[in-house]
Image (cartoon, coloured by chain):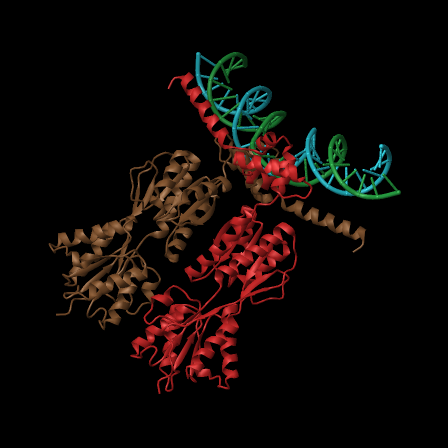
Chain colours: A red, B brown, C green, D cyan
Amino acid sequence: MCAVLKYAYSQILVECSRLKKITIYDVAKKASVSPKTVSRVINAEQSVSTKTKTLVESAIAALGYSPNTSARSLRTKRSYILAFLYDNLSPAYVMDLQVGILSICDKAEFNMVIRPCNFTSETLAQDIAALIKRSRVDGLILSPPISDHKELIQYLEEKQIDYVRIAPINTKLKSSYVFANDREAAAEMTDHLISLGHTSIGIILGDLSHLAGQERLAGYKNSLKKAELPVNSNYIEQGDFSFESGESAALKLLTQKQPPTAIFACNDYMAAATMKIAHKLGLRVPEDVSIAGFDDAPVSKYLWPTLTTVWQPVQQLASQSADLLINKILNQETSTAPLELRCELVIRESTAAIKK
Amino acid sequence: MCAVLKYAYSQILVECSRLKKITIYDVAKKASVSPKTVSRVINAEQSVSTKTKTLVESAIAALGYSPNTSARSLRTKRSYILAFLYDNLSPAYVMDLQVGILSICDKAEFNMVIRPCNFTSETLAQDIAALIKRSRVDGLILSPPISDHKELIQYLEEKQIDYVRIAPINTKLKSSYVFANDREAAAEMTDHLISLGHTSIGIILGDLSHLAGQERLAGYKNSLKKAELPVNSNYIEQGDFSFESGESAALKLLTQKQPPTAIFACNDYMAAATMKIAHKLGLRVPEDVSIAGFDDAPVSKYLWPTLTTVWQPVQQLASQSADLLINKILNQETSTAPLELRCELVIRESTAAIKK
DNA sequence: CGAAAAATTGACATCGATGTCAATTTTTCG
DNA sequence: CGAAAAATTGACATCGATGTCAATTTTTCG
């Protein structure tokens, strides 16, 4: 290409890119005000007259202007980025949390960076410290079990970094948190089994380092007590929310001399495992043994019979926590009351009245 | 708190926050060079002497400096952000893609923003255009079926926005893409069933607007032809990758006069549905009917019997595409050869030799 | 050795927003 | 009405990096 053409071409490109980039100065010119005033309108500051506001707003609309995040971040020292930390074996749960957070981020013009973690990693706190430093995130959302990672939380408290926790066990910190009424829901599920005539109800526990693990056990015990049924330690098996742990727990429960006639597994993966073991042992579900889960995971619909379980307000938990966090970041709001959201029983085919 | 104390306290806070912010000027001072030279080292530019480079690097390490992304973005007009677009019913698949992309983003110091989409939404292209404008993303990774969203792709081509596609159908565009050998894998799976003695092999098709849907059908046909078995249209049922579509397809296949003795479902959800229908019809798996899936989704391990399926290199697809995209953004590399990654058969319990 | 070429380095301007503080305009009220 | 108070607006500096271009240092080679 000859030099003249090359130059012309480069000018065209420059022109094109210029057309795309609308700055606050273009808006200011169009509205015949100063850039600072445009800035005031964008940031919804108080002292702008209605007339000016309308003028600027129509200029913004006409030019299709949207502020440059980098410039704004540089000046305000905010990144407008949230980090979402998780270490969870259920992809569907994590995806739901993401969607919930995103819905709020979109409205508030924040970005979300996600970070899969390993709860047992010795370097977790350091890794997150590095992430915060590098990405300059404004705040973090911690999901279980990260919600109770002592070292990380100590670091965040020390550095006064904003964070919100989903379903934490330690609720003594001043940082806000959200949670679901797992205990009540677990009690309702146990009530449901009792109402079907079951008196020997086994439970497969989840990981007790999750709040959910503790609360679901508590709900189960509460329900039994209310119905004046004994809490039989032979009917309580430890699991860790994984399918494999569910298999061995179910095997122990169902091969006893007096096996339970109903089993409440503290999540759907362990319930699925229980169904598998029941099949292997030649037990029909729900005729010989009723099985209930928790979480309303996709697998609960794909099993045969379909699984009675508990739906959790996962997206709502996430969006609430994002809302709290963004408020904290932007308005320096310090303490907010913990938020409790409600679960719902989903009765499907895997539970039925006891066989006489 | 009295005014004097309050003032002292605020000064301490100011001091603290100042301590945290190390700028390029601090590094320059410590290394006794100009900020521009520090910038050269950070960006691995050529013309820096080894001596200076070492000096600057140790200053960076000593101070624990990491560059301010906002300032850099503002100057270079790059956001160092990738967008990952998806519309997929399998959370596990999407999570794997995310993890793959993240692994590369971490190395390259990019951030990833994720965007759940609705393929059938009329405003998809506009929505993404708004996202690009607002978040100023440097490039996009499109996963199926978004990989073939005509309107969106036309927009990206027009605006010359970098993007990489995962498993696209239309491969005539100059934009690079990555894909797995679904066709061969589907043929291998069909070969496997044939080798077990099956000659009546049904297939439940996936959504043919996904490359995977088309390729898996092609592999099935290829295998039958190679084995000189007829392609019987009664044995081909349309599904859309959902569990529900699998149920109705399986019902049609298995209630024929001469039902197939093996069914290859084009993903694991539809295979799970087929298992359910088989159970309902009183057919044992694999004694009466062999069932195979595709994807190695979590559910394939939770079913009873466990599901024979195909493992896909999902994380690798994602990390490769992120790698291609970042190279394109940073080095303006134009065309790269499409990348094909290999699937693997996972033989479990749901397939067996035909009953005599 | 010493001039020319190449490599290295730095001074200064700039990206596009908002913070600070002062100037201007409008409102209040005796 | 007119001074004081309140509300609105704008001028200018600045956040922390990198681009441009020129100055300086080092290397090359007759």
Q: Position of residue A62 (x, y in %)?
A: 53, 34
Depth order, front residue of A344/A253? A344
Q: Position of residue B184 (x, y in %)?
A: 23, 51
A90 on left or right of A75: left
Q: Residue at x 40, y 82 (%)?
A: A260
A277 on left or right of B49: left
Please tell me whether residue A184 is drawn above or below residue A23 in the rendered image.
Answer: below
Q: Residue at x 35, y 82 (%)?
A: A255
Among the 4 quarters of the image, the one containing residue B249: bottom left
Please tell me whether residue A306 is drawn above or below residue A122 in the rendered image.
Answer: below
Q: Position of residue B328 (x, y in %)?
A: 40, 37
Asked whether residue A214 appears in the rendered view, the answer is: no
Q: Residue at x 77, y 52 (%)?
A: B6
> On the rendered image, what quadrant is the C terminus of chain A found in?
bottom left
Q: How many marks?
A: 0
Among the 4 quarters of the image, the one containing residue B96: bottom left
Q: Position of residue A318 (x, y in %)?
A: 51, 58
Among the 4 quarters of the image, the one containing residue A78: top right
> On the rendered image, what quadrant is the N terminus of chain A found in?
top left
Please tell me whether residue C27 is drawn above or below residue A210 in the rendered image.
Answer: above
Asked whether residue A300 appears in the rendered view, the answer is: yes
Depth order, front residue of B203/D14? B203
Q: Residue at x 48, y 26 (%)?
A: A15
Depth order, front residue of A245/B356? B356
Depth order, front residue of A265/A255? A265
